[in-house]
Amino acid sequence: MRYIRIGDLLVKSGAISQAQLEQALALQAESGERLGEVLQKHGFITEKQLIDTLMNQLGVEFIDLNAYSLPPEMAQLLPKSIAKKHMVVPIQASRTDVHLAMADPLNFVAIEEVQAVTRRRVVPYIAASAAVERAVQNLYSNQGAMRAIEDMQRDLLGSQYPGVSAAQSVAVDEESAAADAAPAIRLVNSIIERACTEQASDIHLEPGEANMNIRMRIDGSLRPIITVPGELQAAVISRLKIMARLDIAQKNLPQDGHANVTARQEALDLRISTLPTIYGEKMVVRLLRKTPELATLDGIGLAGENRRRFCRLVDNTTEGVILLVGPTGSGKTSTLYTIIDRLSSDEVNLVSLEDPVEYHIDGICQVQINEKAGLTFASVLRSVLRQDPDIIAVGEIRDGETAEIAMRAAMTGHLVLSTIHTNSAVSSMDRLLDIGVEPYLIAGAVKGIISQRLLRRICPNCRQSYTPSAEEMALLGLEGRPEGYTFYRGAGCSECFNTGYRGRIGAFEILPITPDIRRAIHARSLREMEQAIAASGFQPIMANCRELVLQGITSPAEVHRVLGSEH
C-alpha cells in the first residue's frame, strides 16, 4: 500500500480518465496541494467518488464521524498539533493499535508520524474531510472544557471566581491562552471557540435544577453542546458578565452588555444578555462577525422574477421608504446590508442607525442606538436629518414616532431603508396603521415592501429524490395538478450532522406599491387593496417556496416548519 498512488487508483476504477489525471497533476504542480484536493477543487471528482474508490481499491473502511461518539481520552493519545497538521483523529485504541480516521488514508507521512508519537500500529479509516475537521476541533475543544470543569471543581473551595479579569478585548484562541489560565476563563474560551467552529449565531447558557445546559443555534436550530455542573454555573456566568462589564453582584434584574473577542483568528463582537430565572441567571450570547463577507443577491437566494423586482425597486427608488419585513431570524439584516452595499458610493451620504451595529462597513456612517442614554431611533433620526443625508438606513421601526419621522423624511426627498417585524408584506401596512401612522403618510412614502424567511437547504451530499405524498402536494398548493412531480430530501450524512440540511437560503415576496395600491391604502379599503395587489402581479412567499422545493433546494417539511399554516 505504501507505493500506491491515488491517481492510479482513480484511473483504474474509472472515476477519472488518464487525460484528466495528467491535467490534475499539472494543476497540482502549480498549487502544491494534495492530488485529492486538486481533483475535487476542479470538479474532476466528488468527495463521495474519492471515498468510494479508496474503500473499494484499498479495502479501507469508511466511518461517519458525526454519528460516532469519540472517547474523550483520545485527546490524550495524540497531540492536537499533529491532529490539526494532518487532519486526522484517533477514534479507538488498544495496547498495540490506534484506529485513525483520515480524509486521505494514503497520507503516509501522517501515518508514520502518528505511529512514532503513539508507539502503536495505525489502522486507517476514511472519513469526509469536513467531518474530520469538526471532529478534531470538537475533541480537543471538549477536552479543554472538561479539564477546565475538573479544575474548577477542585478550586471551588479556594476561590469563588478564580482569575476573571476586566479586560474588554479578549483572545480566546486555544493556542494563545496561557497554560495556567484560570479554569473559568479556559472553559468560557473553549465554549466561544466551539461556537465559532460550528458557525453558531447564539450560545444559550440555561440553568437547571442540577446542571447548566449549553446549547448553540446552528443554521437556525438549537443543538445541545455540553453540560456544566450546577456548582460551577456562577463562575461561568460571572466570567462572561465581567467580559461584558456587567454587574456580577446584580442577579435579580436583566442586564445587557457586549465584549470584543478574537476566536480562531476571527474578530467577534459578543452581545450578552442575562435574565433571572428560578434556578439562577440564564444568559444568551450572540456572536456577530465584525468583518463578514457581505451577502450577495445569489447568496441570499434572490433569483428569477423576485430578483428582477428587487433590482427594479432598489435601483430605481431615489426617495421614499423601502421596508424589509419578517419575524426575528428571517435574514432581514443580511438583506438590508446587501441593499446598503449596493447603494453606497462616493457620491452619496449614507447613514445607518442600528441596535446593535452588527457588521462594520467602510464608507458609511454607522450610529449605535443607546436607549439608556437617550439615543433612541426617533431622536437620532431627527439629528441625522440635519446631517445632509441622501440615504438613511433605520435598523428597525419599533414605534409610531420613529415610523412617522421616517415617512416624513422620505416625503422630503430622502431614501429610507428600514425593517419591521410582521409576517408578510401586506400585514406590514396594517402594522404601520396600528402604531399610529396616518394612511396618507404610508400611501405617500412607502415605495416597496420586501418580506422574507430563511429555509434550510437540503444537504447536497445526501440528497435523495422521492415521490411526494398527497399531503405534501396540498401543502404547496399543487392539488389537482398532473402527477409526475419529484421532490427531494436529505437522508442525513457526515456532512450535515445527520440533519439532512446544510446552509440556508432566503424565500421572498416583493410588493412594489403601485398607484392603485396607494389609493387603496389612502382609502383604508381592504377590498380595494386586495384587488390592487392581485392586479400588480404580486407573488406571495409560498410561490417562491414552491419553486425552491421543485428545484430540489429545500423540502416541503422545511417549508411547513418555517411558514406553518399561515400561508
Image (spheres, helix red, strand yellow):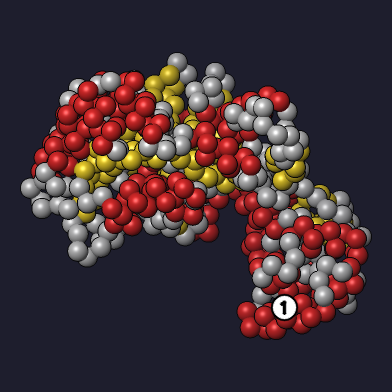
Q: Which secondary structure lies at badge 1?
A: helix
Q: Give whichever of 475, 328 is nearer the camera.
A: 475
Q: Quadrant of residue 22?
A: bottom right
Is residue 306 in view?
A: yes
Tell me if mark 1 has few (under 14), some (14-19) or many (20+) residues whose alpha carbon lies within 10 angstroms of its own.
many
Q: Position of residue 28 (x, y in %)?
A: 68, 79
Quadrant in the picture for residue 124 = bottom right
Outermost residue to the top: 278
> Residue furthest toward the left?
386
When the figure is inspected, residue 265 is found, relative to residue 393, above or below; the finding is below
Q: Measuring 85% from the left and 63% from the top, which residue is drawn there?
A: 54
Residue named by callout 1: 24
User: At 66% from the left edge and 55% from the top edge, which residue is drawn?
Assistant: 130
Rendered location of residue 529, percent (x, y)? 32, 26
Can residue 181 be spotted in the picture? Answer: no
Residue under the image location 17 percent in, 42 percent down: 410
Could you tell me the amino acid type at mark 1? Ala
Q: Is residue 146 left or right of residue 285?
A: right
Up-down: is 349 above or below 385? Answer: below
Q: Work out whether residue 98 or residue 264 is closer to the camera in this orientation and state it.
A: 264
Side (left or right) of 130 relative to 205? right
Q: Residue at 33% across / 40% down in the picture?
A: 512
Give the x, y percent position of residue 109: 77, 72
Q: Quadrant of residue 554?
A: top right
The number of callouts visible is 1
Q: Position of residue 228 (x, y in %)?
A: 56, 32
**171 or 152: nearer the eye?**
171
Looking at the picture, does residue 504 appear above or below residue 519?
below
